[in-house]
Amino acid sequence: MKINSQIKKTLRPYLQALPDIFNYQIATKILIAGWVLVLGRIFQALLKSSGRVAVTSGDWQFLFTTWQGIIISILGLVSLFVYVAFDLNSKIVLTRELVTGEDFSLIECLKEGFASIDKLVNLRGLLTVIYIALIAPIIGVGVSISLTKGLYIPTFIASFIEGSVFYSALAGFAVLLFMSIGIANLFIIHGIVIDGKPIGEAGPDSRKLIRANWKDYLKHNVVFILSIGILIALTAVVFLFLPLKLISVLPLSPSLSRILNIFFVIAGVITSVLTDFFAIPVYLLKMTQLYYSYKQGSEFEFRERKIKNLGAYKKLAVVILIAVIGAVFLVNDHFDQFFPLDTDVKIIAHRAGGNEGGENTLSGLEAAWNAGAYGSEIDIQRTKDGYYVLNHDGTFSRVAGVNRKPEEMTLREVKKLSVDGDRVPTYEEMLIACKGRMVLFTELKGNTADRKMADDAVSLVKQYHMEDECVMISLKYDLIDYIERTYPEIQTGFLTFASFGKTAELNCDYLGLEEESATKDAIDSIHDEGKKVLVWTANDMKSQRHFLCSKIDGLITDNVSQAIGLRAELEQRSDLDRMIDKIKTIL
């Protein structure tokens, strides 16, 4: 009985705060969305004046070498400060009022949060904003903003780091360093916003509070996060997993089983969205309570608050319930359209055969074909005497043990090399091996990737009449644009792992996206422009399943057999699995 009473006492302040947090989140998201819309229009106008539709990872220098790019960079940095003011500073003002029980208005919270931004307009403030916006989301320590909470290290970079003991150790040291900085300066924004301190005082004060209370801070964090996690888990078990399990074992008709599955899955999605919606403000509420506790040297109790307009929230809940029921019947009537069973995603072997055979070799290509791959992605570079051979890196050191660049060697010298027991093939040999069997995605690679390479590669494709069986791809957009304009009959693809602007309007037939940047919105916008989407390089089963259930056109992977086997498994899924897989591609 005492335990139940203590739990209620602990949770009551957070439950009482939810309506105010809800109002705040809605208001700020509307304001931020409006600003992002205006900013996007300004950026697009600047890009248009420079003759561009987007800036990508392939031409980021534009941001620092043109007046349009410099204006975009400055506006972006200023907007980051503004975003921090609305998304973090104002939240801390809100949590202060909720913890202390003061009466407040949302407008006052926003004004005060915005006014406190002037204390960040200095070098220390800039570093603090960069940490909050860019570093905290990646390492998962310290307060962050919702705009960049999904920030990530691209998979191909992470794989490169993991493949080297030195870089792994360096990355581990960097993570520990930034974690220490994040924890030590946890209360720096609280000091600025709540006590009005300049950042030069707020930083040392935060570090002093953490040094004196770090054990208590860790204890409260662990208990708080575990408590919330257990509460969410229990809610999910009672209201989602148990009902879904009962549906699967009870002797229900297929139509009723499907309707009930749809209802509980939609309810689960709503719960997940609301959890994400409230997560950061509720966590900041706890941090603000700890800030007051550490300042006064004893536990700071929440002041009791009354929930205003409770009737309005009950009516909103009823409206949501009615909408859910309507959605259930709509989804049921178009179930196969919303959650298709089959997938049309093509499997493309990375670097000729992926893990099926030697990298960028004829045997690798043959292995990929035997495994059932639709296509093969290869990398070509030019030799000293003008031939085109396959190699991914700048030198042959990794694959053949020779630390020389392709452009430093003749074809005769290259042919003496051995990659897993195979000779290094020429581009012409790969074309011949692919003809009538697979689609060849040829990446123009390295220092010799220029217009001459483009002209020569296209000439070879035409020589073998393989215009419909080849796609020229590159990380260099100017090269892809050149091919598209000069040889419109040749299919092209631009590879990028970061971009902003109207990326879908870039002049190419395919857009190759790195895993984390291949969002539903990005995929849809590319398809709306009549282009196709490639995703590179999805190797683990979870990632492959995700993209095989999406609307992409091609999946480049090292694990070809695994992807093909997984695709066959997906065709045997239950209704519930189909819904869950599809939802994962959206959220």
Image (spheres, grey):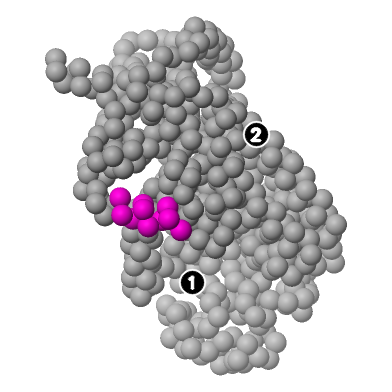
Hey, what amino acid is under mark 2? Leu
Residues packed near mark 2 inside 10 Å, few (<14), some (14 to 19) or many (20 plus): few
Residue 116 in sight:
yes
Q: Main secondary structure of the magenta part?
A: helix
Q: Nearer the viewer, residue 97 or 477?
A: 97
Residue 373 in sight:
no
Q: Where is residue 470 drawn, in percent x and y?
A: 69, 62
| Image quarter of residue 319 | top right
Q: Which residue is mark 2?
A: 31
Q: Residue at x 48, y 64 (%)?
A: 157
Q: Which residue is mark 1?
A: 359
Instruction: Determine the CA span between mark 1 and mark 2.
Output: 51 Å
**Range of the magenta residues?**
200-209
Q: Nearer the viewer, residue 276 or 128?
A: 128
Quadrant occupied by the N terminus: top left
Q: Where is residue 551 drawn, in percent x and y?
A: 60, 40
Q: Where is residue 64 drawn, in percent x and y?
A: 70, 68
Residues packed near mark 1 inside 10 Å, few (<14), some (14 to 19) or many (20 plus): many
Q: Residue at x 62, y 77 (%)?
A: 446
